[in-house]
Amino acid sequence: MILDQISRLSLYEREIPGASAIAAAFAAENPGAAPCEVREKAYALKEDSQRRFEVHGHTIDLMMAREGAEEIALCPDDRLEKAEALPGGADGRKLNGAPCGSRVQLEAGWFCAIFPGEAHMVGGRVPGAESVKKWVVKVPCPEAFCTEV
């Protein structure tokens, strides 16, 4: 996992392929200019009991916050119970278990890159925020980072 300011995203080009182009697309508010799939998300924050973990095997989830904030719980996927595959043949699966491991706060102007094998639970409540608006960029992962899920 990498947590840093979006203004520094291009420094991580080696770890996050296309980081410079993604940062430029974000600055221009043009998801179509990114070199990979961008999902624009906006949602209300939830209690832990309403959230679930997921993990990916071949993509980096690059979360770039535009407004608001959220807590993201992170832990190794082997600490959780494997559950159903993600719908539509998407890369990854859901995992069962309560928040454990580390918790980070993603705020407007910051990014969090979550790599294959890093289970993550998004949308957690943080003081002073009710919701988050962000991009979730599905970055194809270099083979060396890939894992089976």
Image: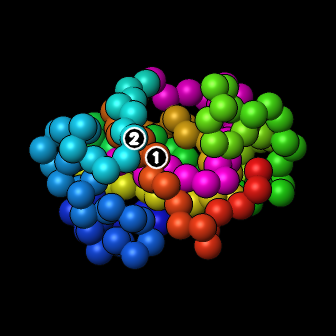
The residue at the point 31 percent across, 50 percent down is 35
The residue at the point 67 percent across, 47 percent down is 55
The residue at the point 29 percent across, 74 percent down is 11
Q: Amino acid at mark 1?
A: Lys
With 61 as the anchor, is 145 left or right in this view?
A: right
With 85 as the anchor, is 22 left or right in this view?
A: left
Q: CA distance from mark 1 to mark 2?
A: 5 Å
Front residue of 12 and 65: 12
**Where is 134 relative to 16, above or below?**
above
**Which residues lie in the magenta part?**
44-64
Q: Is residue 118 a member of the stretch shown in magenta?
A: no
Q: Is residue 50 a member of the stretch shown in magenta?
A: yes
Tell me where residue 52 sits by quadrant: top right
Residue most extreme to the right: 81
Mark 1 touching mark 2, by CB under 8 A? yes
Residue to which mark 2 is pinned = 37
